[in-house]
Image (cartoon, rainbow, N blue to C red):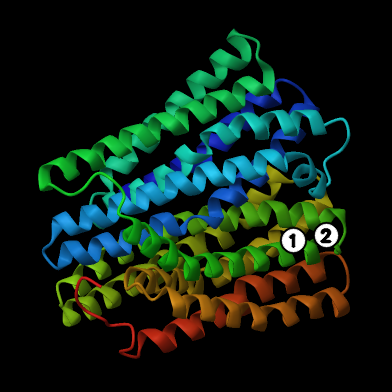
Amino acid sequence: MPALGALVAEPLFLLADSAIVASLGTLPLAGLGVAGAVLATAVSLFVFLAYGTTASVARRLGAGDERAALAAGVDGVWLALALGVVTAALVHAAAGPVVDALGVSAAARPYALTYLRVSLWGLPGMLVVLAATGVLRGLQDTRTPLVVAAGGAALNVALNVLLVHGLDLGIAGSAAGTAATQVLMALVLAAVVARGVRRTGAPVRPHPLGVLRSARDGVPLLVRTLSLRVALLLTTHVAAAQGDSALAAHQVASTVWTTTALALDALAVAAQALVGRSLGAGDVEGVRATVRRCVRWGLVVGVALGVLVVVTAWPVAGLFAPQEQVRGDLAAALVVLGACLPVAGWVFVLDGVLIGAGDGRYLARAGVVALAAYAPAALLVLALAPAGRTGLVWLWVCFAGAYSLARLATLVRRERSAAWLVTGAG
C-alpha cells in the first residue's frame, strides 16, 4: 500500500501542472502536453535506476551485509545524478527538434520549449528520486518514499500556484515549481540514504567499478522498457488510423489502463524487494512461497479491478466522453480492457519477481520476443479491421489480451525453471 501511494503521487505532478496551466489558455496547455510527453519518456527510460537498485540492495541486505547494500545504493544514486545531468544537457540542446518531432503547432511551440527547458533543471533530481527510492525499497522501507512523494505533490501545487498566479510567471513558473520540488525531494531522500550510510560506515563517494556495474546491469532493463514503449507507441499509431472518435476513446482507455497498472505495479514493487532479500539470504523455499503469494494477490487484484472496470464502463465513458460516438467506442474498449486485467496482474507480478532476482537479461529478451509477437497482430488490425469501433475493439484485444498473454508465456516459462534462482549477494 505505501508503494502504491508513492506510485500514484508521481502522476499527480503532471496533473497539478495541467490543472494550473489550463487556466492560462489552450496554447500553454498544449505546450505542456508536448513537453510533458518528452519528460515522461526520458524518466521512463531510466526507471531501471529504481528497479535495478531495489534488487541489488535487497540481495545484499538478505545476505546480512547492510553496509554493502548501502554501498550499492550509493553507486546507484551517483549513476542517477550523472545520467540526469547528461540527459538534461542533451535534451536542452535538442529541445527544438524534439518538440517539432512530436508535431507541436507553431503557436504552441514557444510554450512547449519554455516548459521543457526550465523543467530540465529538475531532471537530475527526478532520476535521483528514482534511485534513492530503489535503495529504500531494497531496504524494505516503502513508507519513506510515500511520505516524501506525498509531501512533494503538495509542495508542487503550492509552488505552482505561487509562481504561475502569484508572481505571474506563466508556464515558466509551473516548470520552475515542479523542477524545484523534484530537486528538494531528491535532497530529502538522499539525506535519508546518507543517514544509513553514516550508521553502517558505507562509503559516500562513488566507487567507479560499482557505478559501472550499476550502469551495465541497467542496460537489459532499459531494453525491456524500450520494448514496452514501442508497443505503446505502435498501439497509439494503429488507434489513430481508426478515426478521431476511436482515437479519443483510445486515449481515455489508455489512461484507465495506466491507472490500473499503478495498483498492479505496487505488487510488483513488493515482489522485487521480497524476492531480492530472500535470494540474498539463500532462502529458495521462501522465494517460491513469496512468488506463489504475490501471484495470488496479482490475480485477485486483477480480477477485482477487471470487474470494476467492466461494471463501470458505461458510466466512466459518459463521464469522459460526452459525444455519443466516442462514449460507445470507449465503453467497448473498457470492457475488453477489464476482461484482460487478471492476466495483466499475473504479468506484472512475475515481472517484479524476475527484476527482484536480477534476471534483467532474460527480461530484455522476453520483452523483444513479446513485442515481436504483438507487432504483427497490431499491424493486421491496421490492415484488415474496419475503422472505428470494430477496429478499436480488435486493437485492445491484441494489446491488452494477446500482448499480455505473450508476455505471460515468456515469464511463466522462466519462473517455473530454476535458472533465475541464483542465491547470495550477487
Residue that appears at 56% across and 30% down: 16
Classify mark 2: helix, strand or loop.
Answer: helix
Residue 197, quarter of picture: top left
Residue 338, quarter of picture: bottom right
Q: Which residue is mark 1?
A: 236
Neighbour class for label 2 at 10 Å: few (<14), some, many (≥20)?
Answer: many
Question: How far is the residue under mark 2 from the one under mark 1?
Answer: 6 Å
Q: How many marks?
A: 2
Label drawn at residue 240:
2
Q: Amino acid at mark 2?
A: Ala
Whether residue 343 sits left or right of residue 322 in the image: it is left
Quick check: 366 above or below 197? below
Closer to us: 226 or 263: 226
Q: Amino acid at mark 1?
A: Thr
Badge 2 vs badge 1, beta-carbon distance below 8 Å: yes
Q: Is residue 150 visible?
A: no
Residue 63: image x %, image y %?
A: 14, 68
Classify mark 1: helix, strand or loop.
Answer: helix
Residue 331: image x %, image y %?
A: 69, 58
